[in-house]
Amino acid sequence: MMAGFPYPTEHAVPLFLAPMAGVSESPFRRLCRAHGADVVVTEFLSAEGIRRENEAVLSKLRFDEDERPIGVQIFGADPDAMQEASALVTDIFQPEFIDINFGCPVKKVVKRNGGSGCLKDLSLVQDVIRAVIRGTHLPVTCKIRSGWSEEMRDPVKIGLHCQDAGVKAIALHPRTRTQMYSGAARWNEIALLADALEIPVIGNGDIKTPQDAHRMWKETNCAGVMIARGSFGQPWVFAQARALIEGTSVPPTPPVAQRFAVALEHARMVQSYEADPIGAALEFRKHLGWYVRGLPHSADLRRLLHQVNSFGEVEGIFSDYLRAAERGDFAEDGLPVAATTEDAELLGSAHE
């Protein structure tokens, strides 16, 4: 019989926000929790940086109480460094669990056998897991890919090694490292892994809509679903996926003004979190681009948003866009903007 998750989750099939460098920072994690994510995980962080108490790395370990349950994800190929990092994270930050990244395909990580680079040596994978477990009393989980290459593709073998070493749950992104993000994620491998293991398996990969999350759960029998790029610019995807999984009424996708209000709420959270307001605004440009995807004249809107140097500029651009919609400037596009005076007031109140 499959074991349950080793940390508290509100729902039988929890929805996870995936750990993503430069995206799953504290403000976005808080926003996704508010919109229905059950569990969030930090950006993946270097064990070497943690144990050396690198200020930039440690700053990314900060989280608020409303983010719980939260996992801290660490990576590295040196068992000693991983053990020390595990102990420090446990003592100082006290998350609900520690997650090991065996999935990152980025060259600068794998060149030192970090991330998915570890998958070339499953004895190293086990050594790393056991070292992390020695460093903490918290549950230890991991995120894997299906293998280093097509020739070494065997997610069940990898998962069994991880389970034997002591992890309490596994998230699988069913691509190999050499695939990077090309091709299609093989969801059938999630089903095979879920069937083979006694611990919970979390499915991840190619979830762009709430319907995708529901379909993955139905097709694979995974214990939880992890959403990555599908959350970009649409944190409400979690509430919509939850409704589909539980067979309840699906919340509608927010109209434009409400979408803008969520974007401004996100911006305000970033502004209060980051020490450098200009740097924060520049870094936030990518989120703004995601929030306006699919809108009438979105290319022009993105061009303006990708030039902002302050969060105050964003509110002005959004207000101008809603006024243009109210005048009917976008009527020829045949796309619903649903911008009214009431919507404009909603936008203003979101930034007060």
Image (cartoon, rainbow, N blue to C red):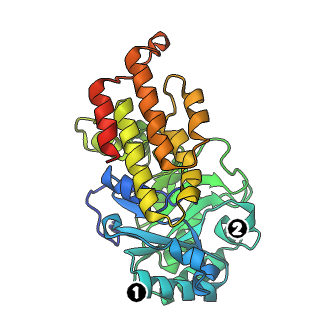
> Callout 1 environment at 10 Å: few (<14), some (14 to 19), or many (20+)?
some
**244 or 348, which lies in front?**
348
Q: Amino acid at mark 1?
A: His
Q: Quadrant of residue 173?
A: bottom right
339 on left or right of 149: left
- Residue at the disc numbered 2: 109
Q: Amino acid at mark 2?
A: Val
Q: CA distance from mark 1 to mark 2?
A: 27 Å
115 on left or right of 237: right
Residue 252 appears in the figure: no
Question: Residue 135 appears at what percent x and percent y?
Answer: 49, 89
Q: Quadrant of residue 199?
A: bottom left
The furthest residue to the right: 111
Instruction: Determine whether 164 is above or below 238 in the image.
Output: below
Q: Residue drawn 52% across and 70% down?
A: 60
- For numbered disc 1, what is the local secondary structure? loop
**Which of disc 2 and disc 1 is earlier in sequence?**
2
**67 or 79, which lies in front?**
67
Q: Residue drawn 57% across and 44% down?
A: 308
Question: Residue 189 appears at what percent x and percent y?
Answer: 54, 51
Residue 68 appears in the figure: yes
- Residue at the disc numbered 1: 137
Q: Residue drawn 35% across and 24% down?
A: 339
**Could you tell me which quadrant the N terminus lies in?**
bottom left
Q: Residue drawn 52% across and 59% down?
A: 277
Instruction: Determine whether 101 is above or below 244 in the image.
Output: below
The furthest residue to the top: 332
- For numbered disc 2, what is the local secondary structure? helix
Question: Residue 212 appears at what percent x and percent y?
Answer: 44, 39
Mark 1 or 2, closer to the camera: 2
**62 or 214, which lies in front?**
62
